[in-house]
Image: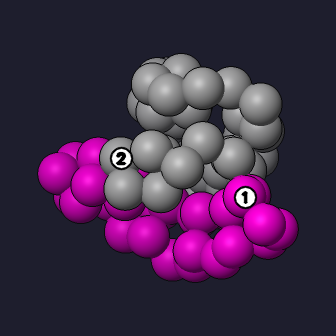
Amino acid sequence: MVVKKLDVVTQVCPFPLIEAKAAMAELASGDQLVIEFDCTQATEAIPQWAAEEGFTVTDYQQSGDAAWTITVQK
């Protein structure tokens, strides 16, 4: 299993989601993508996208006042 990190802190929506989609496309089934972001809209957009694609959110944490980390498994 590969764990890839994606840092999209300082990027405004929809760019964190666009970057996440591109990174996930490069991963194999079972791999994980750890996304670090600070766009409040992405707190809903990324989990919704993961659910729509059939991916599993294995971890989701607020890491600061306006920063989050979410792990999505393909």
18 to 1, vertically: above or below: above
18 to 65, vertically: above or below: above
Q: Is 66 colored magenta in this rendering?
A: yes
Across and down, in percent, residue 3 comes to 71, 56
Across and down, in percent, residue 40 comes to 54, 49
41 to 13, vertically: above or below: below
Across and down, in percent, residue 35 comes to 66, 50
Residue found farthest to the front: 65
Q: Which residue is mark 2?
A: 45
Snapshot quadrant of residue 56: bottom left
Between residue 65 and residue 26, name the one nearer to us. 65
Between residue 67 and residue 22, name the one nearer to us. 67
Amino acid under disc 1: Ala
Q: Report the magenta residues as a range.
A: 46-74
- Colour scheme employed for the rendering of this structure: one colour
Mark sitting earlier along the chain (2/1): 2
Residue at point 47%, 46% (across, down): 42
- Residue 31 in the figure: left or right of residue 69: left
Across and down, in percent, residue 13 comes to 50, 28
Give the crowd class for mark 2: few <14, some 14-19, many >=20 residues within 10 Å: some
Label number found at residue 66? 1
Residue at point 17%, 51% (across, down): 52
Residue found farthest to the left: 52
Compute the Cα span from label 2 to label 1. Answer: 15 Å
Snapshot quadrant of residue 19: top right
